[in-house]
Amino acid sequence: MSIKPVVALIGRPNVGKSTLFNQFTKSRQALVADLSGLTRDRQYGDATYEDKSFIVVDTGGIGEADDGSGNIDDYMSEQSHTAIHEADIIVFVVDARAGMIGADAEIGKFLHTLGKPVYVVANKVDGVHDAAPAEFYALGLGEPYPMAASHGRGVGNLLEVLTADMPAQENVVEPRGLKLAIIGRPNVGKSTLVNRLLGEDRVVVFDMPGTTRDSIYIPYQRDGKDYVLIDTAGVRRRGKIDEKVEKFSVIKTLQAIEDSNVTVIVIDAHEGIVDQDLHMIGYALDAGRALVVAINKWDGLTPDQRDYIKLEMDRRFSFIPYVKVHLISALHGTGVGNLYPSILRAYKSSMFEVSTNRLTQILQDAVTANPPPTVAGRRIKLRYAHIGGHNPPVIVIHGNQTSALPKSYQRYLENQFRQVFKLEGTPLNVIFKQNDNPYANKSDTPTKAKTQQLRQRERNRAQKFTTKDKDKKPRKR
């Protein structure tokens, strides 16, 4: 199984990158809308052409230096630079109307150093001479593809070329087993942990036929149970990957989280718990994935440092009290084996099943112990509950006036369910359904209409008899 290829759109501002991005993604929702400190200058989208799928990145414009000269690093944003390095294919968009300028040449020189496939798109060819795109041959990046992105002209030809060597999605075979994603910032020890997980005596690693160079899905067994390791740090065949060359990729992290059943986030104890760690925890929770936290390099801390990290854990992890935190050393193996019980409990919790009768009984017990508040003199009634989904688990509660239920009471019910069912490591979505009267705001309800009809019949009958009485002539005596 292969991770989706990544195509980055780069170029100066206002050359049509966003228009081309919209042509690629059509109406598809962006993979990620806003990631503080990471996506300020780039947008990710999911694109499909025929039976091929890929991720497209719309980078921020690479502007010119103030004096119109300078090295590429002088005016390339950090975010554009990151997007280019995490891409598999580069689409360099230039403006055919403006012609080639110094900034285009500088970008072209930079792209030559990457060793990645680069496709030059001469956009805005509508209204210019047919020979205008030929000017960009001077970049030395191959034949420019003429395009009018705003009208969709030339987009199909480019997509056909870009996807020629991409794997067809329908040929992908899902490996069996619990999908386990290892995520974290660069150099926190993900590679070491992955190698430790795959290198234990009781672990058997399987070679997947057709595994490509960029595959990140590794099936293996431990204690007779099937797992699939989703490794965001690169391919692990049986060798090791140098942690120093590992680069952080938002795309790989997001895909790994989405595809996983359980996510393990690795945090460097020496650097403490930073905002980026919390962002990634947030991704996992937003995706509804079960979570385990591994604080790595614990053995290298002094007693004072350990006390400080424990205080930080209490403070910064207060929003996930149900998540198990492990203190480990991936290098020496300390505590690594203890991850598996937490992983299995988190997965079991995310997939838990319970009957409607049992769930409703727990709900009623919680309501009896702590009744919901009244609204306008009427008490909120919670009638019954049932399971509405898995991974994450969803509990649906039906009742009246549930929209007025305070957030504090909603949290109370969530905590009751967690406590009774021992739900560890997984987000829990509790949804409230209001059983409103479907005829509440309708003037012509069936009951009212029926009443009116009966009354009309009575009036008609009374009127009929009255008329008959008037028509009768008085009897002569």
Image (cartoon, rainbow, N blue to C red):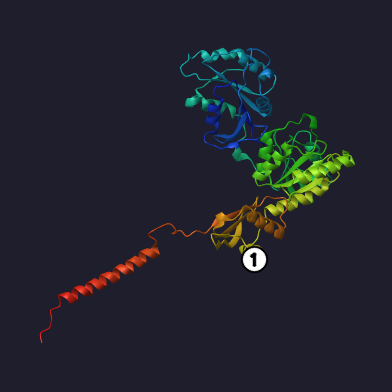
At horizontal 36% and vertical 66% (from top left) the residue drawn is 450
Whole-percent x, y for residue 457 in the image: 29, 69
Position of the N terminus, as image quadrant, is top right
Q: Is residue 85 left or right of residue 163?
A: right
Query: Depth check: 475 or 123 in front?
Result: 475
Identity, as a three-letter code, of the amino acid under mark 1: Thr
Note whether residue 208 is visible.
Answer: no
Position of the C terminus, as image quadrant, is bottom left
| Occupied quadrant, residue 73 | top right
Residue occupying the far right of the picture: 303
Q: Residues within 10 Å of mark 1 (few under 14, many from 20)?
A: few
At horizontal 32% and vertical 66% (from top left) the residue drawn is 453
At horizontal 63% and vertical 25% (from top left) the residue drawn is 90
Whole-percent x, y for residue 129 in the image: 48, 13
Q: Is residue 27 left or right of residue 364?
A: left
Provide the residue designation for mark 1.
368
| Occupied quadrant, residue 139 | top right
